[in-house]
């Protein structure tokens, strides 16, 4: 399946459906795409290389589109190895090519490639342009989206924004079924989500541009109803809830805390909660749990006490939320403990350190097994959470 943008802007990336963990931590059951683009004009520019796992396939795609010509430029948008690891091979094959990047790009190149073959380098700054003939590239720096050297590129004649990791999505392109939101949301909050302020800055920079296509480094090329995708990014990067609803994150050792959490879910639904989502942190994908915590406007954390602290999966979940700048939500706490319940107090302390998190005053405490009388505390907690 071809994913070309136009006659002159060609897709030369690859799908990787053998990868099990993206960045060594995020499961990708439908793989991932490594996107790379080629602009063919009087001068030829490649926009990013790809992960070394697929270098040979990428080179074959490149040479097929070059049809005997040689590339003049390689634009390096992002130095992360899933996008830049094939740079050494490219420069070896085309030693007359010019690497285009900003000052931070070239500092990282020295760190990643100790013996990169000598070639020309062009250092660009925010707003600089590069003419290829009828196509002109405008460089827009995007520091900390999500590395400091990141820059996006706007092609002025065909009005394409090459957005680097912004607007990216998990999943191979030949698995894409048109459902962008779910895996794009999981990608955003786990990969880019910490840097909401920097994403907001990038959105303001590109707002004056007439953008007709967004070409990210992962996931599908976006062509229609671009306002919808930009609005999603505006919501996500400003940490506003996307949907009304309650997400219950549960970490249960023997199932008793889970029984209480599921009983709370039933109570919330009976009291009119628009949506109740549930995750078992001991088994479910942690990245999806982080995604749902940011998606909904209310969160319940339910955990057992363990070694005088918080049961480990919940501790990890809360650490992830803190790392990703979780904020602007209402949160309720359910704890369990047999002889010295401590999880509730400790979870509250972690949540209090987060920005604009409103914590329900009450805590529902389960002592060992969940019993019918515990429903009274859950009813009261549900009322406070939904108020």
Image (cartoon, rainbow, N blue to C red):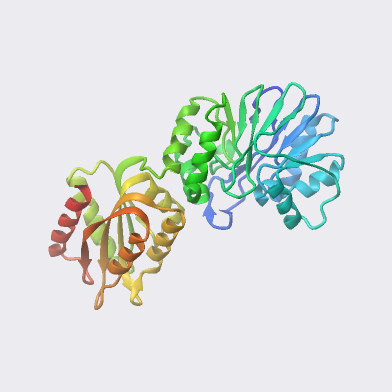
Instruction: Quadrant for the N terminus, please.
Output: top right
Place of residue 4 in the rendered image (x, y in percent of width and height, measured from the top left) = 66, 28
Q: Is residue 167 visible?
A: no
Where 49 sits versus 378, above or below? above
| Residue for point 48% across, 51% down | 194
| Residue for point 69% across, 44% down | 50
| Residue for point 39% across, 60% down | 318
- On screen, residue 151 versus residue 207, left or right, reads right
Place of residue 66 in the rendered image (x, y in percent of width and height, measured from the top left) = 80, 31
User: How many numbered dots are placed on residues in this image?
Assistant: 0
**Viewer-closest of 143 and 364:** 143
- On screen, residue 127 versus residue 206, left or right, reads right
- On screen, residue 160 versus residue 113, left or right, reads left
**Viewer-closest of 317 and 22:** 317
Residue 377 position by quadrant: bottom left
**Viewer-closest of 125 and 330:** 125
| Residue for point 66% across, 21% down | 157
Residue 75 position by quadrant: top right
Where 119 sits versus 110, above or below? above
Q: Is residue 138 visible?
A: yes
Place of residue 189 in the rendered image (x, y in percent of width and height, measured from the top left) = 47, 48
Place of residue 154 in the rendered image (x, y in percent of width and height, measured from the top left) = 64, 30
């Amino acid at each position: 399946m071809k994913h070309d943008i136009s006659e002159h802007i060609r897709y030369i990336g690859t799908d990787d459906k053998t990868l099990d963990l993206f960045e060594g931590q995020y499961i990708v059951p439908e793989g991932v795409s490594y996107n790379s683009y080629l602009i063919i004009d009087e001068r030829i520019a490649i926009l990013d290389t790809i992960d070394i796992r697929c270098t040979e396939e990428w080179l074959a795609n490149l040479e097929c589109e070059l049809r005997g010509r040689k590339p003049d430029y390689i634009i390096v948008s992002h130095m992360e190895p899933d996008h830049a690891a094939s740079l050494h091979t490219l420069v070896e094959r085309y030693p007359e090519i010019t690497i285009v990047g900003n000052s931070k790009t070239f500092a990282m190149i020295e760190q990643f490639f100790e013996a990169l073959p000598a070639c020309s380098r062009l250092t660009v700054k925010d707003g600089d342009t590069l003419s290829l003939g009828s196509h002109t590239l405008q460089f827009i720096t995007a520091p900390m989206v999500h590395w400091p050297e990141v820059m996006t590129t706007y092609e002025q004649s065909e009005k394409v924004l090459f957005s680097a990791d912004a607007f990216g999505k998990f999943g191979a392109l030949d698995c894409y079924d048109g459902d962008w939101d779910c895996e794009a949301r999981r990608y955003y909050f786990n990969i880019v989500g910490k840097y909401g302020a920097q994403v907001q800055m990038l959105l303001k920079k590109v707002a004056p541009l007439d953008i007709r296509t967004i070409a990210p480094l992962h996931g599908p090329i976006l062509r229609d109803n671009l306002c919808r995708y930009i609005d999603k990014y505006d919501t996500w990067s400003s940490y506003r809830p996307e949907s009304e609803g309650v997400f219950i994150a549960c970490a249960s050792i023997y199932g008793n805390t889970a029984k209480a959490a599921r009983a709370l879910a039933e109570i919330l639904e009976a009291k009119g909660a628009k949506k109740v989502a549930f995750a078992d942190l001991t088994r479910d994908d942690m990245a999806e749990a982080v995604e749902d915590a940011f998606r909904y406007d209310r969160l319940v954390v339910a955990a057992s006490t363990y070694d005088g602290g918080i049961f480990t999966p919940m501790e990890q979940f809360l650490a992830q939320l803190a790392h990703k700048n979780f904020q602007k939500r209402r949160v309720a706490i359910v704890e369990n403990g047999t002889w010295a319940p401590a999880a509730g107090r400790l979870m509250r302390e972690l949540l209090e350190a987060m920005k604009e998190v409103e914590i329900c005053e009450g805590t529902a405490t389960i002592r060992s097994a969940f019993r019918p009388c515990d429903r009274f505390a859950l009813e009261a907690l549900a009322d406070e959470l939904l108020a």
